[in-house]
């Protein structure tokens, strides 16, 4: 996605260290999909280079085809889940001006994406913000319990972007689908995708989509944990 989060200010494991880890959730990674009560899936999507860099400027610049793809992905979600850095980055880029008119720099093919993310319901995980707007609610307290509650609500699914918040969610076993838009680029630097992940997560490929640019979208789901 254009402008994925790059948390430059705080090391990966420190930013969400104040949120309690739910060992009961982590130990049943993947098992929640087998419960009788259907839960909204949480999907994580991000651009990543061939050597694993997920800095938002490391890949190819967005084009009409990739923006159509990301617009469709956001439209699949009932709500978007952001950390503070991603929320502020996205708001600065994609919030519709008070004039009601998109800025002159925006191409026509970018407007559908802008309209979609502007009107989307958003949840922002932050311990430092005192309030949010842009059709957003603030999520504070126990991260695992808060996201579990969101997943238990009715709907088609939730979408999360960024770098640090998805790492915390992956650690808790709360991500149901991983989508990597692999860019035909070798960045030669970080940050590296899900760097610091403490437990191995095995994935199964469920879909792929090739772009004219040479980028490939790969969609995975965690495999079920077996004894």
Image (cartoon, rainbow, N blue to C red):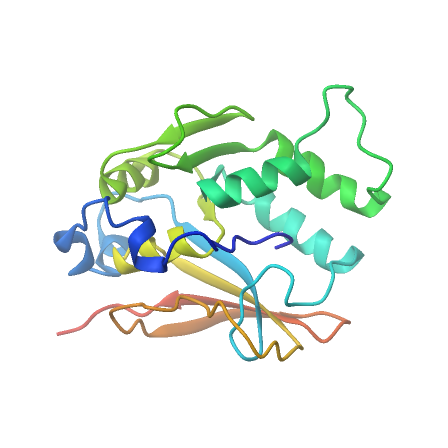
In the rendered view, tell whether residue 48 sits above or below residue 169.
below
* Residue at (12% x, 53% y) in the render: 24
Pinpoint residue 84: horizontal percent, then vertical percent: 45, 40
Asked whether, in this view, residue 157 is left or right of residue 33, the answer is right
* Residue at (60% x, 59% y) in the render: 56
* Residue at (25% x, 70% y) in the render: 199
- Total of numbered circles in the picture? 0
Question: Which of the two residues, 9 or 97, is positioned nearer the viewer here?
Answer: 9
Pinpoint residue 165: horizontal percent, then vertical percent: 39, 51
Q: Residue furthest front?
A: 9
Q: Residue furthest top?
A: 99
In the rendered view, tell whether residue 59 sits above or below residue 64.
below
Question: Which of the two residues, 225 or 134, is positioned nearer the viewer here?
Answer: 134
In the picture, the quarter occupied by the C terminus is bottom left
Question: Which of the two residues, 61 or 80, is positioned nearer the viewer here?
Answer: 61
Asked whether, in this view, residue 177 is left or right of residue 98, the answer is left
Pinpoint residue 17: horizontal percent, then vertical percent: 25, 50
Location of residue 151 by image quarter: top left
Location of residue 91 by image quarter: top right
Res. 174 in view? no
In the picture, the quarter occupied by the N terminus is bottom right
Res. 217 in view? yes
Asked whether, in this view, residue 149 is left or right of residue 119, the answer is left
Pinpoint residue 179: horizontal percent, then vertical percent: 51, 63
């Amino acid at each position: 996605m254009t402008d994925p989060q790059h948390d430059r200010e705080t090391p990966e494991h420190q930013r969400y260290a104040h949120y309690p880890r739910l060992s009961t959730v982590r130990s049943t990674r993947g098992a929640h999909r087998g419960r009788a009560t259907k839960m909204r899936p949480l999907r994580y999507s991000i651009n990543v280079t061939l050597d694993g860099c997920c800095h938002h400027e490391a890949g190819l610049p967005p084009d009409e085809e990739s923006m159509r793809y990301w617009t469709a992905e956001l439209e699949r979600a009932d709500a978007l889940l952001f950390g503070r850095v991603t929320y502020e980055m996205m708001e600065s880029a994609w919030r519709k001006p008070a004039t009601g008119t998109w800025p002159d720099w925006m191409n026509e093919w970018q407007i559908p994406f802008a309209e979609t993310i502007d009107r989307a319901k958003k949840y922002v995980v932050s311990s430092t913000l005192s309030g949010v707007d842009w059709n957003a609610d603030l999520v504070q307290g126990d991260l695992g319990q808060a996201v579990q509650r969101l997943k238990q609500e009715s709907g088609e699914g939730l979408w999360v972007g960024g770098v640090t918040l998805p790492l915390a969610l992956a650690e808790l076993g709360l991500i149901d689908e991983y989508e990597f838009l692999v860019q035909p680029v070798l960045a030669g630097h970080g940050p590296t995708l899900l760097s610091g992940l403490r437990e191995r997560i095995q994935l199964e490929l469920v879909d792929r989509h090739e772009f004219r640019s040479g980028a490939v979208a790969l969609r995975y789901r965690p495999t079920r944990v077996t004894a």
